[in-house]
Amino acid sequence: MFAQSTEPHPAASWRTLIHGRDRHELVTFALVIAVVVSSFLGHYVVTIAGYNLRWEQAVPLFFVGWLIAYARTRADFLRALTHPVVLVFGVFVAWNVVATLVFSPSLGKSASILVWFVIDLLLLAGIISLGARAKWFENAGIRAVVPWGLAGFAAFIVANASHGGFTPGTDFDGMYQVYVARLTSQEANIYASILVLWTLLLVARKGRDRVWMVIAAVAVPLGVIGSQTRTAVFCLAAGLIVYLVYEAKRSFQARQRRTGFWFGPVVLVVGIAVAYGVATILPAFGEDVARAEPSATSPSEPAATPEPSGKLGDIDFEGGNIGFRIEVAKAAAEDMSGANLWLGNGTNTFSLRHDQPGSPGVPGHIIMLPVQILYDVGIVGLLLLVGLVVTVLRHVPWQRRPIAWAVVVAFSAAATLTSMFWFSITWIVVALLIRPVMDGEGTPEDGGSPTDRSTDSSTTYSSLKGL
């Protein structure tokens, strides 16, 4: 089994960090915070030699470089490169390289995503190498969602109330004539998905951080309302349902009365209800303007004015964002046959072959992860991705399996309408799911069947060895 370290290597206390008794730990902690913060900054890039380098790509390189520069952490990092999750992800990245070399009409276009994958791989290994100190990432992330959620909602209100007079942190959705919050993320869908993932990890604390859970239960739904992202609401609800079902099943099997796991989901449901209540008293932003869609009627035939529809309430499969994505999927299917169906068309090459539906001259993008993977690396690549998910779940300690399944379901649902697979938040969360168990996570209230515990006992022991 994989072991993090062979030497005692506990996480330094706050007092030790503050008094500078372990400067290496202090710098490592600062870089952890920087990596988490940079994962929220997907909108910002620096152009170098014609390539856009994102802050969330640059900062992890400093983090990994620091780990490699120090002898003790270098050994842990090199050992982490042999972790099964890292190895399977590495095979997936290698297959992307092969498919690109064989089928891509532009290696330069594909290289931007391939390099991003390599950075993700290094980041994943770096976090795994920290062992118990990976908890720093979780603590920083769940603290960041509250101000980020509130700021996104504020940006949404200000941009729409000012009718576009002041729009920082928002994008204008011309289809629905409304400004949507993305804050510092690349787009609104990514912004909302990040909020959901961190909130699910907070729920997994089973009420041990109740004050912050209550605050987040208000702030996160407000941020999701500001993003106007229907998928995020569904993902959060689906994740909570999976988590509750798994925990309830454990409680029944263990014949124990356990109430801690109910706290987070209950306050979140209340928070979502409050957020939607707030949304009902807001002005109907964008609802007084007809949705901007290309008319399918002839010039001589007047186009019927569509009924106004708020973005959050629109589930029209014939038009809107859902209909747009269906059109993109149909365009992608044109190139998926024969060898390309099995081996792919090369990483990040859809835009080289297709324009956006309804927007001639605008390079297309798939924005749906399953379709994206199938298009880029074919059925072989999709099977490797499934293998990666299975490997991750296999290495999640039993204490974290309910929330791991919740995250997988929520992420899978989000991935059907957005592509955040290569963003650093994804690999931070993956690493946190498989990190070693700390004191307090395996309490009797957590329950779990003997089978669950024995299955992971050797993995947990080897992961904790030397921590």
Image (cartoon, rainbow, N blue to C red):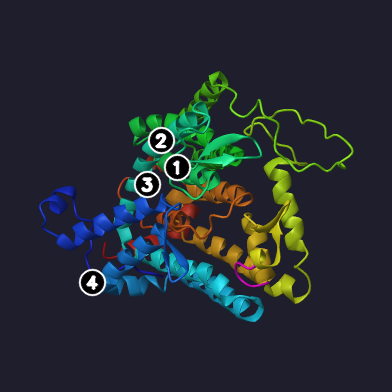
Check disc 4 and report the residue beneath it: 72
Amino acid type indicated by mark 2: Ala
Amino acid type indicated by mark 3: Gly
Check disc 2 and report the residue beneath it: 151
- Nearest to the observer: residue 419 or residue 401: 419
Quadrant housing residue 68: bottom left
Q: Look at 26% across and 65% down and name the residue there.
A: 466
- Nearest to the observer: residue 45 or residue 253: 45
Amino acid type indicated by mark 4: Arg
Other-residue count near label 1 (Cα within 10 Å), few / some / many at <14 / 14–19 / ≥20: many
Measured in 3D between alpha carbons, the distance from the residue under mark 2 to the one under mark 3, in whole angstroms, is: 15 Å
Pointers 4 and 3 in contact (C-beta within 8 Å): no
Read off the magenta span. 345-349
Relative to 355, 218 lies left or right: left
Residue 175, how many percent across, how many down? Answer: 66, 39
Q: Earlier in the sequence, mark 2 or mark 3?
A: 3
* Residue 346 part of the magenta segment: yes
Pointers 4 and 2 in contact (C-beta within 8 Å): no
Check disc 3 and report the residue beneath it: 141
Frontmost of labels 4 and 2 is 2
Q: Is residue 263 visible?
A: no
Picture quarter with the C terminus: bottom left
Q: Earlier in the sequence, mark 4 or mark 2?
A: 4
